[in-house]
Amino acid sequence: RESVALLAAALSIAVVEDITAGELFERVTAMDPLQLGGEFSQPFMKQHLLAARCLVEDGITDQQMAGRLSAAFGKLNTFDPLRTLGTAFLAVLAADGEPNRAMQIAVNHVSSDEQGAPIRFEDIDCYAGIAGALAGAIHGVDALGSGPVAQVIEANRAVHGIDLNDTVDRFISRFYG
């Protein structure tokens, strides 16, 4: 619950405020959204995301960052909220909020064996999807490029019969119109 609350808060903040990836990370890790405490009476996600922040350093490549995330979170269950949200948030932070870079870092998350050799890709669609949503909320849909956005719009229309442009227009009209 805590990770979902933090993700919702992060997306909401990024959509309505002009904010950098670093500022968003700081705001989100200052939150205790459920006010329930957690492990040792501290918000679990906040405590662990802040501890993992040191993985992001200037001068490392995106591939190195993906490797660091894999090493840091690879022992957790594939669907562990810390692994999912941690990978996404730190990929966005490492990519300075650039959606395509953030998704590439997140999508290259792997599990490793005891010697550190890659075994398999993990739940990379979720990791990359969350990273893309966060980075897209920070920089706007234009940062993704028109090609990928058009592909998603057309795929949803063809496969699901959903017109995303119409859905967005109705949402904006209902809540902001």
Image: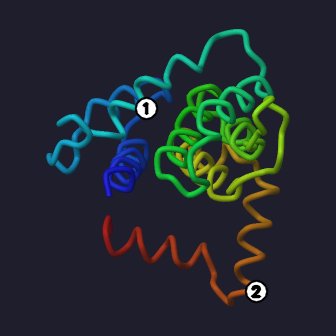
Residue 67 position within the rendered picture, expressed as x and y whole percent measured from the top left? 74, 29
Quadrant in which the C terminus is drawn: bottom left
Q: Which of marks 2 and 1 is nearer the N terminus?
A: 1
In the rendered image, the vertical position of residue 80 relative to residue 63, given as above or below: below
Which residue is the extreme one toward the front?
Answer: 114
Q: Name the residue that disc number 2 marks.
A: 159
* Residue 105 vs residue 121, the one in the foreground: 121
Q: In this view, does 137 lie above or below 172?
A: above
Q: Residue reaching furthest bottom? A: 161
Which residue is under mark 1? 49
Left or right placement of residue 51 versus residue 86 in this view = left
**Amino acid type, residue under disc 2 in the picture:** Val
The residue lying at 70 percent from left, 58 percent from top is 125
Q: In front: mark 2 or mark 1? A: 1
Task: Pinpoint residue 82: horizontal percent, then vertical percent.
Answer: 47, 44
At mark 2, the secondary structure is: helix
Position of residue 99 in the picture relative to residue 32 (left or right): right
Which residue occupies the foreground of this view, 105 or 84? 84
Residue in view at x 80 percent, y 66 percent: 151
Name which residue type carries label 1: Leu
Residue 74: percent from left, percent from top: 65, 40
Q: Which residue is drawn at 43% across and 32% down?
A: 49
Residue 176, quarter of picture: bottom left
| Quarter of the image with the N terminus in it | bottom left
Q: How far apart are marks 2 and 1 (CA)?
A: 37 Å
Q: Is mark 1 on a helix, strand or loop?
A: helix
